[in-house]
Image (cartoon, rainbow, N blue to C red):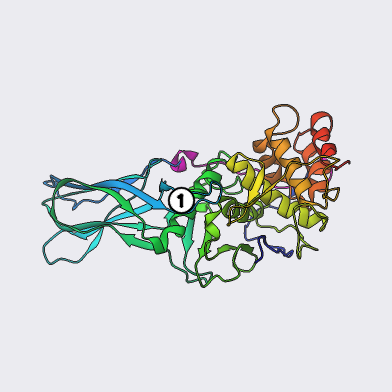
Amino acid sequence: MRLFSRRRHTTLNTHSEPAPVRGSAGRRLRRGRVLTLAAVALGLAVSTVPLTTGSAFASVQTCLTGTLKYTATDAETGTRPTSVARNVNWELRGQTTAGGAETQLATGITDANGNFNACYNGASALPSAYVKFNSSSTKMWRVVTDKSDTATEYTFNSNTQYNTSGTIGLGDVTVPSEKVYAFKIVDVLNLLYWKRGTSSVCWTGNQATYNDCDTLTVAWGANNAEGSIFDIRTRKVLLNSNEPDSKHLILHEAGHWLQWQLFDKHDVPVTGCDGHTFNKISSATCAWSEGFADAVAAYTLGDYRYVFKGGSSFDFTNDQNTVGWDQGDQVQGRVSSSLLDLWASAGDGGNWNKTISVMTDYQSDDFHDYFVNDRPNGGLSTTGAAKDFLVKHTINY
C-alpha cells in the first residue's frame, strides 16, 4: 500500500488574472486579491435556512432537532469512540400538503457540538418530515463515492415523522456503519480548515469570496482502490478501506491538496519519490512535498508524529546524532521536523500563519527554495533561531 502520494509536475493556471510581478529576488509574486466576504460565513457557524410558503398567514413551525454522531476506530488512541459530527450539511425534507410531492424545506449544517435544528414555517402541520444528512460541509469540502467526475456524496436519512408540528426531538442520530468513514472524514477536515491561516473564507487567500472557493473533494470507498494519495489527475484525495481510521493519514493527503491550492494550482515538480520513507533520502522535491504534508497533519493534530491506519506511529524527533536517519533536505522527516519547529516558534522562526502567507505569494520548488529565497521575500528570518532549527535537523544552508 502506498501511504503517500506520488506527484508529477504539471503547469496549471485556471485563473484569469494579471501577469505576475516579481519580488526582490526575482521570485514569482502574485498580485493581491481583495477580500470581499468575511470569514464569518464559514467560522464555521451553524446555518439554518428555513423555507416558507410565502403566505402572510403562515404561522405553524415544525422543527426536527437532534445530535449527529458517528462511531469509528481512532488509530491515534487505539479506541473506538463515539464522536459528534461537526459542520455536516443537512436538509429538512418532507411534504407540505397531504399527498403532495416531497420537497426540500430547509438546509443548514450541524454546529460545533453536532446539533441540528431543522425548522420549517408553514400554514399547517407537515404530513411528513425527515432530515437528510450529506457527507459534505457547505461547499468547502465533501466526501464522494467515486473518483470520477460524476461522483456523488454519501447520504442517509433520519426516521420520518408524520403529521408534525412544534419541536420534535430526534435525540442522537447515528451515522450508519457502512457510511461512517465518509462522515468521519468530513468531521476531521474541520481541524485543517480551522487552522488554514488566512482571513479569506476560502481555503487560501488565492480566492476571496465564497462563490470563488474551491472544494476539497475526498473520494472514499471500494472504487478508489489506489487509496491514500492525492490524485494528480482528478485533484481528489483518494482513500479506501479503513484508511480513515488514521486522522494523520486523512490530513496528510489533504495537506497535498492544500499545498497545491497555496501555490495557486501549480504543482511542486516532484521527482524521485517512489518508495520514499520518513528517515531516508529521496529527492529535494519529494522531501518538500511529503515533508510539508507530514507536518500539516502533525501540526493540525498538535503532535510530532505520523500515525498509520493500524495504530503504529513514526516519531519525527531527530537531531544530528539520531541513529538510522539520513541527513539533509532530501529527507522528508528532516523537512517536516524543521517546519514543525518553525511553526511552533514564537520568535523569528516564523509561525504557521506567516508560512501560509509566504506560500500564498511564492511558489517554492523545494525546501531550499522556500527557506533561502521565499522566506526573506516574505519578511521571514533565515538566521538566528530559524537557522538553528534547520541545523539541528542536519539542514545547513
On screen, residue 376 above or below 287:
above
On screen, residue 73 above or below 304:
below
**Magenta highlight: main SS:** loop
Answer with the quarter of the image where residue 391 lies: top right
Instruction: Using residue 349 as the reference point, say whether residue 51 is left or right of it.
Output: left
Residue ranking furthest to the top: 347
The segment highlighted magenta reads 24-43
Q: Residue at x 80, y 52 (%)?
A: 331
Image x and y of residue 269, in percent: 77, 60
Image x and y of residue 17, in percent: 65, 54
- Identify residue type, mark 1: Arg
Q: Residue at x 55, y 70 (%)?
A: 224
Which residue lies under the disc numbered 1? 80
On screen, residue 118 above or below 343:
below
**Is 371 within the magenta?**
no
Image x and y of residue 70, in percent: 39, 52
Res 382 visible:
no
Instruction: Using residue 171 as the reference point, say whether residue 153 is left or right of it.
Output: right
For the N terminus, the quadrant is: bottom right
262, 337: nearer the viewer: 337
For the C terminus, the quadrant is: top right
Instruction: Using residue 351 as the reference point, say whether residue 198 is left or right of it.
Output: left
Instruction: Using residue 197 as the reference point, say whether residue 397 is left or right of it.
Output: right
Image x and y of residue 257, in percent: 62, 56
Answer with the quarter of the image where residue 376 lies: top right
Q: Which residue is drawn at 65% across and 61% down?
A: 3
**Is 40 within the magenta?**
yes
- For the residue labelled by badge 1, is the local secondary structure a helix, a strand or a loop? loop
Q: Residue at x 52, y 50 (%)?
A: 189
Res 263 visible:
yes
